[in-house]
Image (tube, rainbow, N blue to C red):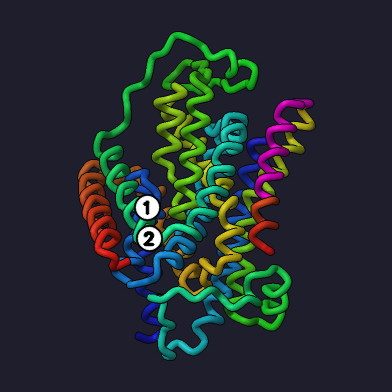
Amino acid sequence: MDLAIGKLLRFGAIFSAVLVSLGGVLYLQHPLRSAPKYNHFLAESTSLQGVAGVLRGAVHLDANSVIQLGLLFLIATPVARVAFCIVGFARQKDHLYIVISSSVLVILIYSLIQGGR
Amino acid sequence: MSVLLFTALLFGASLLAGLLGALTGLGGGVVIVPVLVLLFKVDLRYAIGASLISVIATSSGAAAAYVSEGLSNIRIGMFLEIATTLGALLGAYLTARISSHSIAVVFGIVLLYSAYASYRGRFQDVQMTRRDPLAVRLKLCGTYSSLSKPERYSARRVPLGFGIMFGAGTLSGLLGIGSGAVKVLAMDQTMGLPFKISTTTSNFMIGVTAAASAGIYLAKGYIDAGIAMPVMLGVLVGSLLGSKLLVRAHVATLKVTFCLVILVLGLEMIFSGVTGRI
């Protein structure tokens, strides 16, 4: 189980870094435009906050959406790791840890749904 | 400032933070927020969002290696993740409600503690005779090979460790950091686990803890693509370089220097928070 989890984590980190880099290249297409001001907080435009909006933008190679898609993959990696552990514990017939891992997964999914609203 | 220069500077600073974080074992997240806020004049919320992302990236990258080597204890990590993820939910909830000034002050205090903990060096192994029956029931034990012979270990004071982990999760969600120092404190000092197991299991847990607050950060708009992109890539590359260099570097001198940097940043954060500049 350890080896497989290691592979999963590595893949998640590399894949999301590649997506974010691709988005970064698109983002710097016009390198001389002036940088946005970040000293005042404005919530990101709403189209970027939902998964559907991010996917729609990424298909059209919108730089911010491609970066956000990479970030979503990155956030999904630990969640996938927990799901993966449930399968691992199920194979070992470790009922206690199936319950413990499932609780962690429920908390994670709750936070993502709660946040995504 | 052009967007290219801004992005390049952010990337450079994050690379340095990740490099020093990996070399000293403190992690990059703890310095990236004050650097963004104090040097780049980025709003605290954007800084926290970008830092949280970089924390997930480096945790996944580093944990991949430790888990494969069998150093992280997956059961202990998973059990304690119940506490850290619940704490992270609370922390992320609080971030949206507490003023930036107060968050800056709390951040400063955490920085001062990190500098202190890192300066004091690793704690002595705690010798406790009483085994916690809860640890036996929850299978919070394992073996690890120190020097030559494999040694058995088992967790102690499980409820207290669980409680401290909840606090670590809350800090992580509130400040967008991995709070690895507090996690190691809970496992190493409170639960009496071997230091090596504590640090690697802490690393393994950081990604899941951070993911629990990421959804809320994303929805609140804390994670801005233009900042998160260079910061995540910079910290990730920096920490990978750092772990490669670790064998050759003069860690002792580096550690003292980095501690001083963190100390100054911590004081500056508290000062800026109290005077209302953040």
Answer few, some or many: residues within 10 Å of disc 2's Cα (few below 14, many 20 plus, some between 14 and 19).
many
Please, what is the dominant secondary structure of the magenta stretch? helix
| Residue A97 magenta | yes
Q: Picture coordinates of residue B15 (x, y %)?
A: 38, 62
What is the magenta range? A93-109
In-image side of B248 versus A89 (left or right): left
Identify the residue position indicated by label 1 in the image.
Answer: B30
User: Identity of the amino acid at label 2?
Assistant: Val
Assign the N terminus of chain A to one quadrant of the image: top right
Q: Are marks 1 and 2 in contact (CB under 8 Å)?
A: yes
**Depth check, front residue: B8 or B269:** B269
Asked if residue B216 is positioned above or below residue B190 in the image, the reply reads: below
Q: Residue at x 61, y 37 (%)?
A: B82
Asked if residue B154 is positioned above or below residue B254 in the image, the reply reads: above
Identify the residue position indicated by label 2 in the image.
Answer: B33
Give the SS element for disc 2.
helix
**Same chain, labels 1 and 2:** yes
Q: Residue at x 51, y 71 (%)?
A: B224
Q: Residue at x 21, y 54 (%)?
A: B264
Please tell me in which quadrant of the rendered image residue B99 appears: bottom left
Q: Picture coordinates of residue B168 (x, y %)?
A: 46, 41
Q: Picture coordinates of residue A21 (x, y %)?
A: 54, 71
Mark 2 — on which chain does it sit? Answer: B
Name the disc covering residue A117, or none. Answer: none
Q: Is residue B150 visible?
A: no
